Image (cartoon, rainbow, N blue to C red):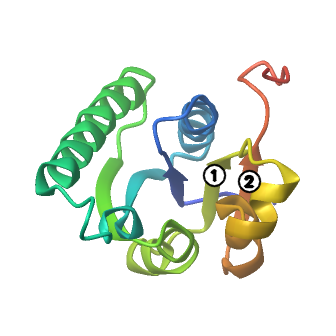
């Protein structure tokens, strides 16, 4: 019997890598007749500095995330994914993607775009994808290629 995923999470952040992960997620959801959950997590640490906090920044980030998720929903439906949900969450992307969202939505596969962090950046801030692969309780697919499995540059 082939592995069949029923509830797939794709975490998006507006990057090219996240878009590739989303497009692969659409194809996997279509093949598996699965629910596709697309999530954008707004990192609240980015807004914690009182000296630089501007409430409108958080509002703009939320509106931009919602607009992107609407575009992704339209793309998924156009590509015959009938069960698609999207959510904007606030908090630590690492924790939200690896634990909270999968638990809330009963996820059995997480897709993430590969990050472009250098080795030094990973040492100091850590990679979301690395954290998720270590802490998620379901399968995780890190996307490094396009829909034709060609490496992106």
Q: Mark 2 points at which residue?
A: 141
- Outermost residue to the front: 51
Q: In which quarter of the image is residue 88?
A: bottom left
Q: In this view, does 3 lie to the left or right of 89?
A: right
- Provide the residue designation for mark 1: 111
Res 109 quadrant in image: bottom right
Tell me the quadrant of the picture where the N terminus can be found.
bottom right
Q: At which x and y percent is residue 44? A: 35, 68
Q: Considering only vertical position in the picture, is 28 above or below 8?
A: above
Image spot of residue 8 (x, y percent): 54, 56
Residue occupying the point 31% across, 27% down: 71
Badge 1 crowding class, 10 Å Cα cut-off, few under 14, some 14 to 19, many 20 or more, is: many
What is the x, y in percent for residue 129?
70, 60
User: What residue do we see at 63% from left, 41% from top?
Assistant: 28
Q: In this view, does 79 lie above or below 89?
A: above
At 35% from the left and 46% from the top, the residue drawn is 84
């Amino acid at each position: 019997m082939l592995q069949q995923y029923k509830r797939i999470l794709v975490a998006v952040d507006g990057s090219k890598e996240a878009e590739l992960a989303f497009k692969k997620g659409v194809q996997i959801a279509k093949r598996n007749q699965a629910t596709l959950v697309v999530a954008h997590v707004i990192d609240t640490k980015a807004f914690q500095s009182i000296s630089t906090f501007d409430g409108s920044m958080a509002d703009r980030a939320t509106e931009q995330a919602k607009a992107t998720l609407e575009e992704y929903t339209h793309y998924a439906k156009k590509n015959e994914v009938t069960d698609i949900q999207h959510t904007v969450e606030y908090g630590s992307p690492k924790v939200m993607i690896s634990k909270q969202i999968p638990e809330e939505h009963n996820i059995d596969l997480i897709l993430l775009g590969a990050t472009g962090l250098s080795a030094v950046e990973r040492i100091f801030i850590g990679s979301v994808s690395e954290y998720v692969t270590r802490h998620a309780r379901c399968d995780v697919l890190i996307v490094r290629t396009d829909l034709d499995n060609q490496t992106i540059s």
